[in-house]
Image (spheres, helix red, strand yellow):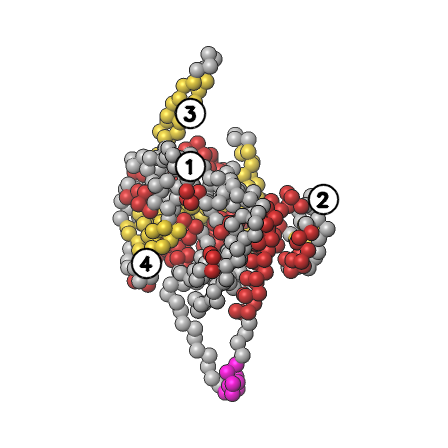
Amino acid sequence: MFWTRVMAVAMATLMIGAMSLAQDAPKAKEEGKTAADGDKAEAPEVDPNKAPEGKLKVATSDEITLKDEARKKDVSLTAIYPEDAGKYPVIIFSHGAGAQADAGKALGEYWASHGFVVLIPKHSDARKSMAETMLENYDKDGDGKISKEEAPEQMGAFFDQLDTDGDGFLSKEEMAAMGNRGGGRGNRGNRNPGGEQPEKPKEEPKDGEDDFDMLGDPREILLEDPAEPAPPAPGRGQGRGQGRGGRGGFGRAPAPLDATAGVDRVADIKLLLDNVTAIVKAVPALKDKMDLEHVGVSGHNHGAYTAELIGGATVNVESTANAEDGTETKTIENRNLADARVKAILELSPAGADQGGLTKESFKGIKIPAMTMTGSNDSTGEGQDAAWKKQAYENAPEGGKYHVFIDGARNNSFTSEPRAWGRGGQQPVTDNTFEWVKTSTLKFWNATLKADADAKKWLEGDTLKTTSEGKATIEHK
């Protein structure tokens, strides 16, 4: 039920906030020592597995909408960019099918802090965010926020704590924060640098409730990008690969890769590139900041498929024509949707051959630099395992191609921090997967969009393998 999920997320958010405050509280000075003793504080050790935030202050704007007259649709987008003056390469991030549009926000903020402008379009297949769903259900006067009077009775005990600015209303940002802990810059207090957290007891759901992990990471339900499954084989179900889309009103069961949807998604990205002036008009702070000579496109799942298409992978698109006598004629057109303005692509959990109109020959069209990324537990749908996803690298031509493989990485490991708590009282996840994702993707963007020779040397060396003790590796050709 919708309200069960809202209350679960609220509870998790408040508990995690309390834990974060406890972790962040200043430690008492050692007995007998004061600043007057002249003792110098020891410099903290630098963990080579961690990806440090950049030095640039980051701003975000999600009040941007572009009109596409040809397709008779609007495309909204979020811009994440450095506040500092300068000209920065542009990265466009394409979310997965059935995912929330801000699924790539954590990566976008990280890249922006290192000197990139990141644009995240909301495709037609995006699911509504928790904040959007709550506003639809409870914002009776349509003012874009929820008052204590509009909020359901069950929320009374938590309302004041969720109302972080104390204005008597829950804003869209405050509601988003309920399910977005740990996802953005400056909100990572749930992570324990020591890697140790007390074990969490399992709470069994009551009769009538779904199996939502009441004290787990709310992002797994609210922000996790459901994997796009292949069509089910006869007599077989879709299995765990299809995620939780469609449960409790937070999404829908994701569809298989679809060439027609891919064409529409590519058109969304081209709309952004065609309308930079309109974007700057909506966000004046972006004036003179976007280096349109150095544009990259990234994506996760169906978004990675989108990046492949705009990067040059050819695709077979089927269309149906209806004759006056009622007969149907189906035709298949092999199309190349490449855009010369795109100089590099990053594919997180990419698509392989024989689905979505792709063949092994399709990837030969990707002439520009490309990085693919998958992991040993990155299995989506029927037969979409890491080996299938690696086809995007194996069948692409040589020259600026990189493939990252992370042992243990799941499908949702590439866009967010690991869960703070294990499900059902398991030990908390404390691996460095997302740190390796951030580091390697930043090196790729620096090498391809900033011509950073040191970054290219890193990509073609063994630093990642050595640092991760073999858990994360990079191939190149």
Q: What separation in Å lies between label 4 and label 1 (alpha carbons)? A: 30 Å
Residue position marked by numbered label 2 in the rendering: 141
How crowded is the residue under tag 2: few (<14 C-alpha within 10 Å), some, or many (20+)?
few
Q: Which residue is mark 3?
A: 319
Return the disc, 2 or 3, that comes first in the chain's sequence. 2
Disc 4 versus disc 3: distance between alpha carbons?
Answer: 44 Å
**Circle 4 — which element?**
loop
Name the kind of residue labelled 2 in the image: Asp
Give the residue at mark 1: 256
Q: Position of residue 262 (x, y in %)?
A: 43, 36
Q: Which residue is mark 4?
A: 471
- Quick check: 97 above or below 13? above
Residue 219: x percent and y percent?
A: 51, 52
Q: Earlier in the sequence, mark 4 or mark 1?
A: 1
Of residue 223 and residue 80, the one placed in the foreground of this image is 223
**CB atoms of marks 4 and 1 within 8 Å:** no
